[in-house]
Image: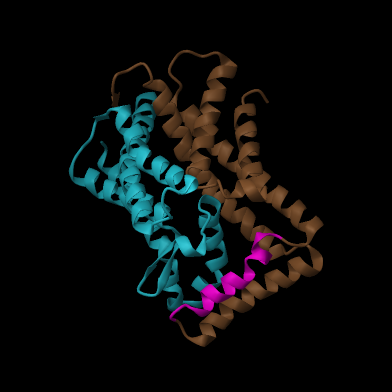
Amino acid sequence: MKKLLPSLVCGFAVGVLQVVPFLRGLSCCLLLPVAGVFSIVLYQKSTGLTDKIPFGKGAGLGLLTGIFAALFTTFFDTIITLITKTNIFVEEFVNIQKAFSDLPFSDEMKNELINMYTLIREDIINNGFSLWYTSGMLFSNLIAGILFGLVGGLLGTYFINAKNSNYYSSR
Amino acid sequence: MNRKIKLSLFLLTTIWLLLILYQMFLPLSSFLIKSYFIIDNIFGVVCHQQEDKLLTIFGIKTMVCARCTGIYLGMFIGSVYILFRSISKINFKIFIFALLPILFDVIFIEVGLYAYNKLVAFLAGLIFGLILFIFISLAINSFYLERENNK
């Protein structure tokens, strides 16, 4: 459990940042990699290690951070949507619809896209839950979390291992 | 740096860059339309995707904002660069300097010094993406070397 804790803490933090409305605006492409980097820093602090951290360990911690972030984000989003029967997807629906209608494609194609989004929106408004929305969110969050978490883990390891050097080299 | 790593990174950044222009490929198949929600959400995790901050290319909107598009294009340029030139070391200060344009751009917009400008955000992202990619490629190469040594 102690080994998982840095990833769990950082993943939880990302989950909160991604879901709380006014904090969501702060989210950007750097959030997940930064969480990955922080998980390495936390790992080093919690273990008291002063030696170089193996890159395999760093990659693993970053990966786990991304997975935890995906799980927490989806979980929080699903619970909040279930209670409020609305979310950013429902609120932004008019803009999404407008964006689709502006696309330089055939009406048939635009309608297919809009219909798909309308079904999801209706499910959320009526039931507070859409299986397609939640599974889509989980899948997307996992892909982004794994990719960006891994990058963060490797970068964090690289930065920490080379902290005492004047330059950063690949050996 | 290992040639396989260089090529893999080039392929990954190319695919990622093409995904940013996903709307362009929608007419090709109905599967792509059905997958739109997933792709849109993947980018939604890592970008605010505010409508007025997206770039428009030939009537098609990018899946991420101007700044993120700059970062990913910068990473793509970096992946092309390392295909032909090897970088074995880089000073950490360069990373900080590359981050400053993005940081100042965000701060200046927030304090109201100037309004959000797509070109400025894109260029700030481009510089950072290029430098960030060099660090990522060096980190991945170190990971690869560690695995090779442990075999």
Q: Residue at x 67, y 75 (%)?
A: A118
Please say whether residue A154 is one of the residues in the magenta stretch: no
- Say which of A91 and A36 sits in front: A91
Q: Position of residue A64 (x, y in %)?
A: 58, 37
Indicate the quadrant where residue B145 lies.
Answer: top left
Counting from the top left corner in percent of width and height, residue B126 is at 32, 49
Q: Is residue A94 magenta?
A: yes
Q: The C terminus of chain B is located in which quarter?
A: top left
Image position of B111 (left or right of B69): right
Colouring used for the render: by chain
Q: Nearer the viewer, residue A106 or A18?
A: A18
Q: Is residue B133 left or right of residue A27?
A: left
Q: Is residue A27 visible?
A: yes
Horizontal side of residue A159 vs A2, given as left or right: left
The hue in which chain A appears in the rendered picture of the protein: brown
Q: Residue B16 appears at what percent x and percent y?
A: 40, 56
Q: Which chain is cyan?
A: B
Image point 35% across, 25% down: which residue?
A: B149
Q: Which residues are magenta?
A: A87-104
